[in-house]
Amino acid sequence: MTHTDDVSAGSCSLGISLPKIWAFDYADGNFPCDTAGIMIKGFAAEADSVFYIMGGNPVVVAKYNGTGMIARRNLGLNMNGSYEALFRLRGDSLYFIDEQANVIYALHKGLQGALAAFSLPMEAEDSITVGEMGQDAYFLMTRKKSLQDYNPVKFTTWSFTYPNHIQKKVQGEGCCECLLPGYCELRDVEVYFNYAGLIGDYRIFLNHTGYDVCFIVVADASGHILSRDSLRNLPPLGAVSGYEEHYGALASDNLNPVANDRVYLTGFNRETHKFSVLEYRIQEKKERLRQHFNVK
């Protein structure tokens, strides 16, 4: 793997660390995915290299310490139609959304105890199209299932506090990521970057422009770029969250979260049967040089 920096002028103190990488054998019969399509339905990271991965049919959630599985539970749910992979660790609970049933579930992070289900107060005709799960609230955009052509009026943007309390409901098409804490409009870019979240006072944006390339931008509160890193020759990126009849393989941005002051990227390699988790830190350039040359 190679790593290159493309730091904007006047902002040379920040950068993205070389990654820690965890590789899982997704074909071992225990990894929670649909091995036919290598689909997972949720990924979350906790401190000290603890990961939660959900997938398969019926859906399974597994807890890992590094690459060692420490708990696994079959939830008996069919979530093949949940393309957004809306899955979040919050406090001592995992929250995830069944987009077809319009239900949010809560499960203790130890994967024990009852699986709690909370209906989302929507009409049966409302279909979830996109979503973002923040720490204190989550945001969904729905459209009417009967919608035959594009009509913004038939979209609704929702804001919920956990587990299922409506905070705000706005008629019309909206931007879910714009509602996440710290969001700002990124300046001086010609391509789209997805807002991934906050690390301290820094705004993190991601752009996957190729099969093995990702660009990470760090910006300030005004949207001015502080650091721009290109990550090349990566393990194949784009963990698949589902297959849709018209669009083919789908890769949700929710499978590349910001958590624990880290940026996580997930992907898989069909040739090696490896599912990879890559963890990046934002750090000062001086610290990176000390680590590179092992200087104390």
Image: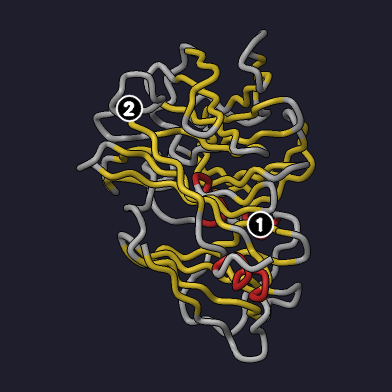
Q: Position of residue 155 (x, y in %)?
A: 56, 49
Q: Badge 2 is on which residue?
A: 34
What is the image's colouring?
secondary structure
Q: Which mark is residue 197?
A: 1
Kindly state the secondary structure of the residue where label 2 is placed.
loop
Quadrant for the N terminus in the image: bottom left
Q: Is residue 49 among what the camera can see?
A: yes
Looking at the image, the residue that sits furthest to the left is: 271
The vertical placement of 181 against 116, above or below, is below
Left of 34 or right of it: where is 122? right
Residue ID at (57%, 30%) = 97
Q: Please tell me in which quadrant of the rendered image residue 200 appears.
A: bottom right
Question: Circle 1: is it few (<14), some (14-19), or many (20+) Cα within 10 Å?
Answer: many
Q: Is residue 253 visible?
A: no
Q: State the separation of the CA atoms marked 2 and 1.
A: 28 Å
Label 1 is placed on what type of residue?
Answer: Gly
Quick one: 69 or 267, which is closer to the camera?
69
